Image (cartoon, rainbow, N blue to C red):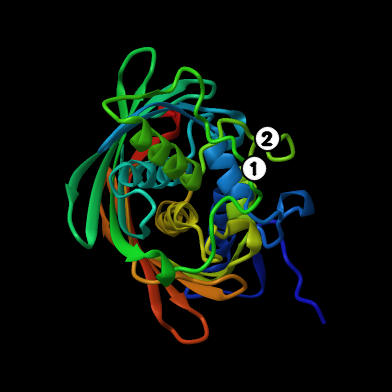
Amino acid sequence: MEKQTSGTGITQETVIINQSPARIAELSAAIEKTGFFTAIPVEYDIKGCLSNIIRGVLEVLHVKTGHISLLLRVKPVVANIYGALHGGVVASVAERVAEACARTVMGNEKNLFLGELSNSYLSGARLNAEVIVEASIIRTGRNLTVVSVEFRIKESNKLVYISRATFYNMPVSNLHGQRNEDGESDRGITQETVIIDQSPERIAELSVALERTGISSTIPLEYDIKGYILNIIGGVLEVLHVETGRISFLLRVKPVVTNEYGALHGGVVASVAERVAEACARTVMVNEKDLFLGESSSSYLSGARLNTEVKVEASIVRRGRNLTVVSVEFRMKESDKLVYTSRATFYNMPLASL
């Protein structure tokens, strides 16, 4: 017999422990508000769609060795429920732009493995706003490249997000699969793109590197749907058990959330961590306050391959009047191998403040 599910991803196998019936009802409502369900609508379940969305909101402005600048347009497809840029999208964009920046130095002779990604959410970029994203290399070595990324509102130059990405440099032969398998040549480089201080040969190399990174400035029409990101992330998670200060989920690595190498997309790791951490915080706070994501960091220890199942466990490590810190671990269900770790810091805000 098939297990019955509700709109929250809570099934007959979900365990809510050590709680009164009234508290169970509150927790179920909190999880529902956070937004989980166990099915991705058919029209969303398309391989590579997340990569298409992220690269489709970006346009390259100028490039030089060790530095790159892009324009990010906050379209409805990348907005959260508050009408601002989705926190997971900030992480996804930071990862993509940081890799493009690293490629201005490394070219294509090596592949890059994302090891660490941290994000600070200072404010919010509203729907239809334009954001200047600037990345610069702050450290590079034989096996390591560290890139800093800043997001500023184009109109006011206000700093809204800061990210830092650490890449490990790997020979191309160590990673399987190639980017842009569809052969698209559109990489967001327009007549207004400026590649400066470079020889013609170097400009050609940088153009190829950017094409490989995948920045196109256009979103396919079938993806340009409000709430797309929320539907994708919510649809790959199923609640396993809930208790005060702790929550556990099952994450299924479906094609829609994989990267070009057939593993869980780095931006999805950050998005899932944010969503699960918020759900965990709600087991303590329920709905009397809203949460503003202030900091998030993720460590990429290994990779979860396509069609595998990952257990995601979140627990509160610190809680105060205005602050909640949640730790999230991702482990392979079959082997219990730890593949990703994350930590999210939320500021507690009254509903009237948002």
Report which residue position mark 2 lands on. Answer: 224
Q: Report the side of 225 relative to 157 (left or right).
A: right
Residue 106 position, x and y percent, is 30, 50
Are discs 2 and 1 less than 8 Å apart at CB? yes
Element marked by disc 2 = loop
Q: Residue at x 33, y 33 (%)?
A: 68
Instruction: Please state, as top left, top right, bottom left or bottom right, where the C terminus lies in the image.
Output: top left
Q: Report the side of 283 relative to 346 (left or right).
A: right
Q: Residue furthest bottom?
A: 335
Mark 2 burial class by Cα count in 10 Å: few <14, some 14-19, many 20+: some
The answer to whether residue 290 is visible is no
Mark 1 burial class by Cα count in 10 Å: few <14, some 14-19, many 20+: many
Q: Report the side of 9 relative to 95 (left or right).
A: right
Q: Residue at x 30, y 20 (%)?
A: 158
Q: CA distance from mark 2 to mark 1?
A: 8 Å
Query: What amino acid does circle 1 point to?
Result: Tyr
Q: Nearer the viewer, residue 53 or 346?
A: 53
Quarter holding residue 94: top left
178 above or below 155? below
Report which residue position mark 1 lands on. Answer: 228
Instruction: Mark 2 vs mark 1: give the one in front.
Output: 2
Q: Residue at x 34, y 70 (%)?
A: 301
Residue 154 position, x and y percent, is 38, 17
